[in-house]
Amino acid sequence: MRIPIPFRRIVIVTVAILCMIATVSANATVVRLNKGQEIQVKFAGDTKVSSGELVKGDSIDIVLAEAIIIDDSTIVEAGAEGKAVVLDAKKNGRAGKPGYIKVAFTNLQPKGAFKTDGGPILLSGELENEGKGKKTLSYLFIFGLFIKGSNGELDSGSVYTATIAESIKLRSE
């Protein structure tokens, strides 16, 4: 029994493609970011993180300040983008009442040669700040009810520590 030539060509091409896929898969490197690993992030650009401008539930852009490096390999490049969310925000008020803001880091998208299996890298960590109150000053003056405390603010130029919330595997492309 002879196998027709077109069928032999299909079999040979299929076997060749499967061999190439197996070679590519064998060369892929898999690394793991462990839960609790600390990373350095900062707020993106000129983002003003203030209780006077943000409300509970607002999303804030963050970036990775320092690359994540394992065994001399850059796993996630500096500048990778992520998100934080405002957990609580109270504006400053009259009679010297200070403002308050609380922010939580939520996720980071991989950037570079390593990728996740589709989802972001989940983060944890919170920051909070209460503005300065001016109650004493407001009681000293007749018009003290019109004196406001300062808003809670987080320095957008500072680098903050976030942690990996769940262990995750990344593969090189």
Image (spheres, rainbow, N blue to C red):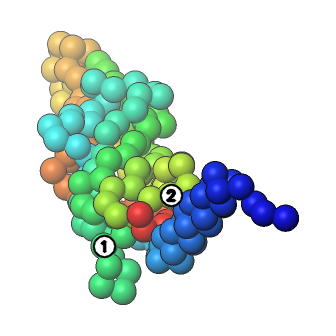
Amino acid at pointer 1: Thr
Q: Nearer the viewer, residue 9 or 21?
A: 9
Mark 2 or 1, nearer chain start: 1
Across and down, in percent, residue 93 comes to: 31, 21
Q: Residue at x 64, y 51 (%)?
A: 6
Quick check: 105 above or below 147?
Answer: below
Q: At numbered mark 1, what does the secondary structure look like: helix, strand or loop?
A: strand
Location of residue 150 (image quadrant): top left
The quadrant of the image that shows the N terminus is bottom right
Which residue lies at the image location 32% right of the left edge and 79% below the top edge?
73
**Residue 133, visible in the rendered structure:** no
Percent x, y for residue 95? 29, 22
The reply to whether the C-beta atoms of the residues labelled 2 and 1 are less than 8 Å apart is no
- Up-down: is 101 above or below 10? above
Q: Is residue 59 visible?
A: yes
Q: Of the numbered discs in the image, which one, if any, rests on residue 85?
A: none
Provide residue 37's location: percent of width, then percent of height. 47, 72
Please, what secondary structure does the residue beneath circle 2 have?
loop
Q: Which residue is mark 1?
A: 74
Residue ID at (21%, 36%)? 47
Residue placed farthest to the right in the image?
1
Query: Which residue is identified by label 2?
Result: 116
Q: Nearer the viewer, residue 28 or 14?
A: 14
Judged left or right of residue 148, residue 34 is right
**Disc 2/disc 1 C-alpha distance (Å):** 14 Å
Q: Residues within 10 Å of mark 1 (few under 14, many from 20)?
A: some
Other-residue count near label 2 (Cα within 10 Å), few / some / many at <14 / 14–19 / ≥20: some
Question: Vertically, is 84 above or below 24?
Answer: above
Q: Quadrant of the C terminus?
A: bottom left
